[in-house]
């Protein structure tokens, strides 16, 4: 069984595209080979800046002969139908077989497909892969039609078996496949022929090319950390940068350079970001001081002066970059210490956040108002939370963040400290964007939590207010990420809050801004008051008119039945938006909890209970229900509950009545019936206080105590007895089972 070696040699492939391209080459080639009948034992793909390589081991030497039997039309079918079948099957009339079946006599064609040699199939599949390769960006060169990420220069395609090596005949746009490759651009001699993958990999290494990207990355990391350790320093770990640099070199040469003393006073994150983004340098830190003092660069060539010239050039370019960073830093510090961060915040009134949602300054004002409301939940000082919200985005106007947007938040912390603001405010400036993803750290300081949650809730309610929700896979404003951030802020800080209240108040704030031009002064005053009344009264539904009446009694000029239309519009629209947004949160919560091992139907059973906007309560209930259903008593009681619910539901539909009251132990005939009455009395007495105390484990434990009595009841008693008094009493008893169990969770939503 031969082995296959393919190398596609070109000009430099961008580092970010290499790993995906290698996988695409492997998948498309192996899929094509298997589809053509060539199975294989194993395959591996590799990439360097100048080549994509694929090795396939244990390939069949020839695809198998195949015989296919294809059913055709009935023998008495129209002649045109038969002729069409003959053309499609590629056979003549005398080759057809007649076979009698239940529905008549049909023609069958026996089609022989002889196998083909591996070299023919490989050439055919490889040409298709090359001509249709899914590069994110590609180019044409010369007069040919071939597109590749960079000009393709060589194709190596070789089959190797016991008899030797056999180049595959293939030509694409004048490039003939062969068994020739070449090594390093500068450090290798002439091109050379290879006879197998092992020979290819060995000779490449002699020609100063390390084929494996993982091996290059490991060599870079080991050499860099060893050099740093020898000086008592440490390399700042950055796996993304390491993978990128490994894709820039075929023969990595690690060099360590100095950072001028003039720049050592810059924040370490500024140095690290500047060197990473502009030069692809690794930062080297002094663990004693936390300062970035040196850098590591990776050259692609060994030099006679051991890289001294390369380092000198790099240090010169780095000094120019860091001079810019130092200028930005010093200018920003002068503003922060002199004018304060509000000078930058004021400028944000000229920066549009969204054409329908106003400027960044408008957004900051809304976030500050919501952050104050949230302090009752987070325990933060209200004035400090408002101040933090007002300055958290000030650094967006700074020169440093304009140059390095990825430093927003972090620079806000530095500038807040320079302006003399408290540690809590400075921390909130840095942390209010967090968490940015499922693995990002969650703020735990009260002020930071308040501002981070207000920021995300304002974003979500704003885009809901203007009907810009995520659709399908499209989420241009990262609203799913914002919702997950709110969920993690609540759960990981064990916060207890009615999220619906804060959604309502922020939606009203957005509606005020969206309709300010069309509303009367009285309405605007009333709406401002309405925001503050939400937490105390609950605004929507019957309470809405009560709150408005209170506002009118305070002297506000509001006429709900006259020209003032915004107030009733808010009362009608916001509840639907709020419900929809809460449903969006619930969908995100299901995904989040599923990753933690809680089933979606368990979450659904808990969502159906009161307090579904209190995520901590909801998750505690779901965890207790998961544990309950994982026990034998829980699983068996669930089946008993479902049986009781099914019998009761069918009887209620058939009789047109609801059996929900009147079960009396005096009508119990069987001992099992009486024991069930007693068990329900005991369970109800234990469940009610446990639910009041939110002790879900105790409530479900009491519910599990019903299992023996429920099992015995169904074994001994016929519910639909002929005696109608007994039947009604037993149906009402089933209703007690259902009511008792539904106090804990809606078990009707549990699957199975």
Image: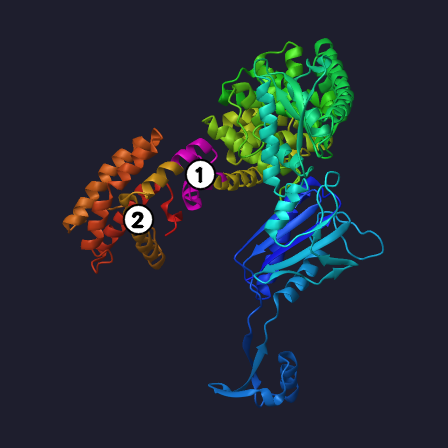
The answer to which quarter of the image holds residue 675 is top left
> What secondary structure prevails in the magenta region?
helix
Q: Nearer the viewer, mark 2 or mark 1?
A: 1
Alpha-carbon span between mark 2 and mark 1 = 27 Å
Q: In the image, is residue 96 part of the stretch drawn in magenta?
A: no
Q: Which residues are magenta?
A: 592-621
Residue at 58% in and 60% down: 161
- Name the residue beneath numbered marker 2: 641
Counting the numbered discs, the total is 2
Q: Is residue 474 visible?
A: no
Q: Is residue 112 visible?
A: yes
Residue 338: x and y in percent read 73, 9
Q: Identify the residue shown where x is 75% and y is 18%.
A: 328
Is 144 rendered above or below residue 430? below
Q: Quadrant of the N terminus?
A: bottom right
Q: Nearer the viewer, residue 143 or 707?
A: 143
For the residues bearing labels 2 and 1, Cβ distance under 8 angstroms: no
Q: Nearer the viewer, residue 123 or 571?
A: 123
Rendered image coloring scheme: rainbow
Query: Does 610 appear above or below 600?
Result: above
- Residue at disc 2, secondary structure: helix
Position of 3 with respect to 272 (left or right) is left
Q: Position of residue 528 (x, y in %)?
A: 62, 25
Q: Which residue occupies the foreground of this view, 230 or 668?
A: 230
The residue wearing badge 1 is 596
Asked if residue 394 lies left or right of residue 173, the reply is: left
Crowd rating for badge 2 (residues with CA inside 10 Å; few <14, some 14–19, many 20+): many
- For label 1, the SS is loop
Q: Earlier in the sequence, mark 2 or mark 1?
A: 1
């Amino acid at each position: 069984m031969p082995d296959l070696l393919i190398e596609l040699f070109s000009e430099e492939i961008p580092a970010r595209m290499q790993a995906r391209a290698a996988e695409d080459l492997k998948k498309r080639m192996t899929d094509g080979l298997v589809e053509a009948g060539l199975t294989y034992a194993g395959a591996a793909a590799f990439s360097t800046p100048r080549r994509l390589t694929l090795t396939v081991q244990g390939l069949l030497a020839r695809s198998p002969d195949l015989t296919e039997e294809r059913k055709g039309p009935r023998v008495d079918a129209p002649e045109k139908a038969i002729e069409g079948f003959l053309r499609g099957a590629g056979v003549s009339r005398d080759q057809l077989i007649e076979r009698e079946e239940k529905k008549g006599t049909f023609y069958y064609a026996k089609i022989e497909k002889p196998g083909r040699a591996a070299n023919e199939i490989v050439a055919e599949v490889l040409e298709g892969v090359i001509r249709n390769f899914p590069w994110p960006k590609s180019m044409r060169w010369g007069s040919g039609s071939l597109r590749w990420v960079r000009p393709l220069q060589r194709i190596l395609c070789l089959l190797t078996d016991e008899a030797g090596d056999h180049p595959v005949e293939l030509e694409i746009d004048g490039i003939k496949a062969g068994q020739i490759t070449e090594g390093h651009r500068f450090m290798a001699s002439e091109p050379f022929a290879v006879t197998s993958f092992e020979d290819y990999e060995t000779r490449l290494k002699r020609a100063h090319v390390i084929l494996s990207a993982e091996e290059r990355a490991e060599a870079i990391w080991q050499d860099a950390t060893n050099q740093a350790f020898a000086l008592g320093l440490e390399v700042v770990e950055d796996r993304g940068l390491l993978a990128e640099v490994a894709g820039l070199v075929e023969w990595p040469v690690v060099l360590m350079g100095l950072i001028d003393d003039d720049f050592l006073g810059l924040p370490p994150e500024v140095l690290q970001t500047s060197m990473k983004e502009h030069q692809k340098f690794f930062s080297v830190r002094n663990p004693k001081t936390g300062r970035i003092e040196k850098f590591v660069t990776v050259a692609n060539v060994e030099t006679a002066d051991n890289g001294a010239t390369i380092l000198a050039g790099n240090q010169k370019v780095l000094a120019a970059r860091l001079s810019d960073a130092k200028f930005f830093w010093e200018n920003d510090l002068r503003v922060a210490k002199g004018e304060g961060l509000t000078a930058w915040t004021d400028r944000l009134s000229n920066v549009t956040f969204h054409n329908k949602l106003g400027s960044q300054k408008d957004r900051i004002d809304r976030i500050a108002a919501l952050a104050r409301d949230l302090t009752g939940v987070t325990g933060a000082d209200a004035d400090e939370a408002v101040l933090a919200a007002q300055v958290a985005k000030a650094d967006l106007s700074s020169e440093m963040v304009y140059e390095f947007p990825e430093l927003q938040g972090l620079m806000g912390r530095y500038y807040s400290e320079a302006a003399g603001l408290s540690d809590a405010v400075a921390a909130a400036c840095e942390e209010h964007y967090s968490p940015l993803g499922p693995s990002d750290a969650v703020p735990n300081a009260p002020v930071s939590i308040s501002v981070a949650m207000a920021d995300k809730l304002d974003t979500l309610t704003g885009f809901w207010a203007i009907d810009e929700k995520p659709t399908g896979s499209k989420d241009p404003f990262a609203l799913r990420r914002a919702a997950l951030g709110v969920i993690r802020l609540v759960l990981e800080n064990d916060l207890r809050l009615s999220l619906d209240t804060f959604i309502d108040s922020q939606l009203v704030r957005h509606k005020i801004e969206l309709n300010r031009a069309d509303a009367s002064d009285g309405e605007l005053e009333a709406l401002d008051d309405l925001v503050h009344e939400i937490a105390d009264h609950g605004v929507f539904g019957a309470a809405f008119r009560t709150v408005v009446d209170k506002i009118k009694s305070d002297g506000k000029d509001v006429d709900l039945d006259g020209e003032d239309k915004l107030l009733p519009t808010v009362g009608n629209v916001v509840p639907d938006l709020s419900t929809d947004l809460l449903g969006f949160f619930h969908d995100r919560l299901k995904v989040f909890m599923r990753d933690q091992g809680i089933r979606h139907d368990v979450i659904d059973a808990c969502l159906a209970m009161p307090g579904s906007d209190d995520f901590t309560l909801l998750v505690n209930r779901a965890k207790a229900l998961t544990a309950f259903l994982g026990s034998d008593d829980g699983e068996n009681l669930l089946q008993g509950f479902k049986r009781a619910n099914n019998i009761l539901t069918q009887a209620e539909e058939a009789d047109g009545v609801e059996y929900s009251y009147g079960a009396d132990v005096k009508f119990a005939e069987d001992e099992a019936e009486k024991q069930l009455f007693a068990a329900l009395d005991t369970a109800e007495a234990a469940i009610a206080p446990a639910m009041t105390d939110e002790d879900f484990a105790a409530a479900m434990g009491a519910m599990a105590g019903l299992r023996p009595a429920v099992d015995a009841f169904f074994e001994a008693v016929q519910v639909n007895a002929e005696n109608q008094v007994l039947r009604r009493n037993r149906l009402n008893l089933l209703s007690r089972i259902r009511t008792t169990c539904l106090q804990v969770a809606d078990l009707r939503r549990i699957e199975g």
